Amino acid sequence: MREILGRRRRLRFRRKGMPAPLDAALAFSAWRWPVVPGAALKATGGRGTRGTGCSCPDPECAVPGAHPFDPNLLAATYDERMVRWWWTNRPTAPVVLATGGSAPCAISLPAVAGARALAALDRDGVRLGPVVATPTRWSILVAPYGLERLGDLLYAKPWVPSSLRFHSGGGYLVLPPSEAAGGQVRWERGPLPGSSAPWLPDVEAVVDALVRASTSAPDEGSRLAY
């Protein structure tokens, strides 16, 4: 793991054991993970019909509170002053990671499939880094990779579970302790508190293991299909 000298900061835990978004965003910036505030949730409807909507202009937003809005994803940075200014002014904004480049990438699965996948990877002895969980999807963080390499990797496979999604260059991932319309974003496997950026596995090792896990269910179909 690489030490970020002169920028020692630990995740500080507050209400219900969760770090405040500002604390988390500053920790990510110390790891040189580029982040940007996400669109906030907002209450919709009147008394008795209240729901949860998104602060973005789209009244039919499919992922309220789980995407960049203003500023857009291209503004993502690990500059501490900018990060502090953003979340000081928007303390409840979700923390959105801009994936790819030199930043972490991710592979995500539906939540049920994700739990099965982690159990299978553990049985196979595959070393994993942080894993982000929402009520609907789990995301395994991996070392940066490019789309060309991903294309070659997937092309070499006879079959890949259609449930997998890949978050690389130009993509994003909502990080804990954000809250989106689907519920709280949390660490299923969190990074160790400290000043070093978490270790991340290679994408090929994770994809290989996921394909093996998905095809090792005779007569039951894919365990990672939903």
Image (spheres, rainbow, N blue to C red):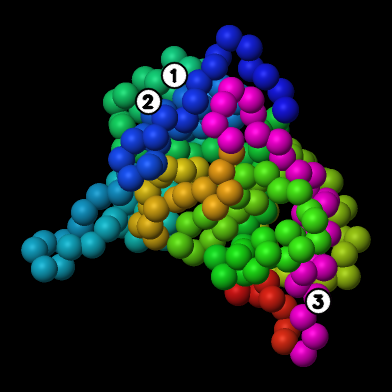
Magenta-highlighted residues: 192-219
Q: Are marks 2 and 1 in contact (CB under 8 Å)?
A: yes
Q: Which residue is mark 3?
A: 216
Res. 60 visible in picture = yes
Depicted 10 relative to depicted 170: above or below: above
Residue 179, image x, y percentages: 37, 49
Residue 96 colored magenta? no
Q: How many numbered marks, from 0 up?
A: 3
Depicted 174 relative to depicted 120: above or below: above
Foreground: 165 or 206? 206
Quadrant that contains the C terminus: bottom right
Identified by mark 2, the residue type is: Trp
With 63 as the anchor, is 151 left or right in this view?
Answer: right
Q: Which residue is mark 1?
A: 82
Residue 204 colored magenta? yes
Q: Nearer the viewer, mark 3 or mark 2?
A: 3
With 96 as the anchor, is 210 left or right in this view?
Answer: right
The quadrant in which residue 23 appears is top left
Residue 149, image x, y percentages: 84, 46
Q: Which residue is mark 2?
A: 86
